[in-house]
Amino acid sequence: MEQFMARGSISKNKGLIEHLQQYGIIKSKKVAEVMETVDRGLFVPDGSAAYIDSPMPIGYNATISAPHMHGMCLELLRNHLQPGMRALDIGSGTGYLTACFAIMVGPQGRSVGVEHIPELVASSVENIKKSAAAELMKAGSLSVHASDGRLGWPELGPYDAIHVGAAAHELPEPLVQQLKPGGRMVIPVGNIFQELKVVDKKLDGSISVHDETSVRYVPLTSSASQLHGY
């Protein structure tokens, strides 16, 4: 029965990826492969419809983004997720993108998740242990930390790729500082109206920013504000 369910979940996950390819969200073989490898069904609450293209609540007034947003962010960052590079996932939630990043940067790279709700950190570690990224966590190239994501995780920086899974009022300066020259950050910015911004740090340290698309994310805030419904 477990083997049957595992095969079923794999086929559903593959179907989701094919859907995102059909609609032009996933453009590269690399992103398709990593999203097929990391089964979304392992990273959502039990009983959730894991393979529909929709965000869903994960508790603590947090959500896991819709698969099309994960695909879009992976495509935007894929040139900065090469083997041996360093990636930072702010608001790592269930650990899904942190696991994807880890597989893309490989055992010689580092994938760091930062989440300010300790219970989500604990559950994300369990999710990752069930996934294709389990060995990378065991080897130490993937780690998840309970901390204020607005401050980043400077101990392991600078980072080639930074993803922020919650909307900031403005670009957080600590994250800009932790972005490596030549690196890229993808971050939603705004209050009621939000834009997914792509932040590129040039080799001379200067910054360029462009808007990719309009989005709707939960706020990047303190853990207390989040737990009290902002």
Image: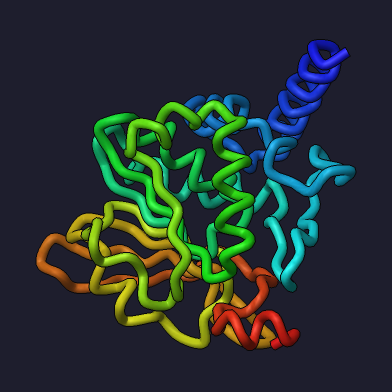
Name the residue rendered at 18%, 73% in the picture.
206
Asked whether, in this view, residue 77 is left or right of residue 9, the answer is left
Image location of residue 229, percent across then percent down: 75, 85
Q: Quadrant of the image for the C terminus?
A: bottom right
Image location of residue 134, percent across then percent down: 50, 30
Depicted 71 relative to depicted 55: above or below: above
Depicted 6 relative to depicted 19: above or below: above
Image location of residue 196, percent across then percent down: 54, 68
Depth check, front residue: 142 or 207:
142
Depth check, front residue: 141 or 204:
141
Image location of residue 20, percent across then percent down: 70, 37
Depth check, front residue: 175 or 112:
112
Quadrant of residue 80 in the image? top left
**Furthest-left residue in this view:** 204
Depicted 48 relative to depicted 36: above or below: below
Depicted 219 relative to depicted 50: above or below: below
Name the residue rendered at 44%, 70% in the picture.
147
The image's colour scheme reads rainbow
Quadrant of residue 204 in the image? bottom left
* Marker count (numbered): 0
Name the residue rendered at 50%, 40% in the picture.
99
Name the residue rendered at 79%, 24% in the picture.
9
Q: Quadrant of the image for the N terminus?
A: top right
Depth check, front residue: 208 or 92:
92
